[in-house]
Amino acid sequence: MKERTKTGAILAVIGALLGIVGHFVIFLKWYEPALVAESAEPGCEILLKYIMPLMFDFGVLGGVLYAMSGYGFFTAKKWAFPLAMVASVLALQGSWFVNVPFMAADMPPVYFAIFWPYLILYLLFMWLVGRVPWSRTLLALFTGMTYIFCFMNGVASTSRIVTAGLPLFVAVQRLHWIAMIGWGVVTVMIPLRSSERMRVIGLTAGLLELVVGIPLAIATAIDMGRFSMFAIGPIFSLALVVVFAWPALWQKFTGPDEGKPSTLTA
C-alpha cells in the first residue's frame, strides 16, 4: 500500500472512532443535563433540545463516512479522499456549533474535546494525504468557517422566531441554510480541483448570505445597540465573494489543477 493511502486509512479510522464513540459518549452524558440547564439567553434551551440531536446526527454520519473512506484508502479507491472531505465537513460542523448554546447556558463546551482533534485530522488529510497547497487549505478553512456561520445564522433565526416571532427572521431563516449548503459543497470541492462550477456555487452562496444576512445584522444591531453576531456570516461571505469574483485572487488561491489529489493512485 502506498504511503499516502496508508496514511489516509489510518487517519480515516481515527476519524471514524472519534465521530462515533465521541458523539455517543458526549451525547449520552450531557443531553439530559443540557435540557435542565438554566439558559443565559431566551430560546437557548430550544437549541439544546433540538440542535444537540441534530449535531449528533452530523457527527455520527461523519464518523461512518470516515469509516467508508478508510475502506476506500485500504483498497486504493479514487473516491476515498473526496469522501474523507465530506466526512470532515460534517464532523467539524457537528462538533463546533453545539458549544455555543452550551456556553450560553453556562455549561462547559464539551464538544471542543472532539472539535480540535477533528480540525487537526482535517489539516493532516489536506497536507499528508491530499498534498493540498497552503493557499487552497486556507481558502477551504475560510469557506468552512463561513459554512458554519451561515448555519448559525439560520439556527439563531429559528430561535428568534420561537421567542419573538418577528417577520424578518421568518423571511430569512431558511435561506441561511441554503447558503450554508452552498459553502459546504465548495469546502468539499476546494481540495479536489478548482472549477468554474465551484466558483459559481461559491458566488451564489456568498451573494445569498449577503442578501439575507445584511438586513438581519443591521436590524439586530439597532435593536441591541451593539455589534450583532448575525454580521459575521455576511462579513465572511463578502470577503469570499471578492476572492471568487476577482480573477487574480481566484487564481492566487486556487492555482492550477495539476496534481489533483482526489485519486491518490499516482
Image (cartoon, rainbow, N blue to C red):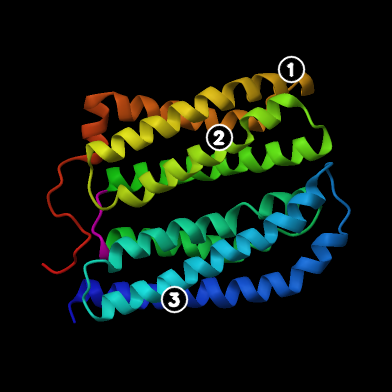
Give the image quarter of residue 223.
top right
How far separated are the C-alphas under marks 1 and 3? 46 Å
Q: Quadrant of the C terminus?
A: bottom left
Give the image quarter of residue 5.
bottom left
The magenta stretch spans which residues? Answer: 129-133
Q: Mark 2 is on which residue type?
A: Leu
Looking at the image, which residue is at 62% across and 51% down? 97
Q: Mark 3 is on which residue type?
A: Ile
* Disc 3 versus disc 2: nearer the observer: 2
Q: Which structural element holds mark 1?
A: helix
Residue 205 point in image, percent of width and height: 43, 34
- Name the mark on residue 222: 1
Assess whether mark 2 and mark 1 are in contact (beta carbons under 8 angstroms).
no
Q: Which structural element holds mark 2?
A: helix
Looking at the image, which residue is at 43% across and 42% down? 183
Looking at the image, which residue is at 67% across and 54% down? 99
Identify residue for label 2: 175
Residue 48 point in image, percent of width and height: 75, 55
- Name the mark on residue 143: none
**Magenta span includes 70:** no
Residue 203 point in image, percent of width and height: 37, 30
- Name the mark on residue 14: 3
Q: Which structural element holds mark 3?
A: helix
Q: Mark 3 or mark 1, which is nearer the start of the sequence? A: 3
Assess whether mark 2 and mark 3 are in contact (beta carbons under 8 angstroms).
no
Considering the whole magenta stretch, tell me its main secondary structure: loop
The answer to whether 266 is drawn above or below residue 135 in the figure is below
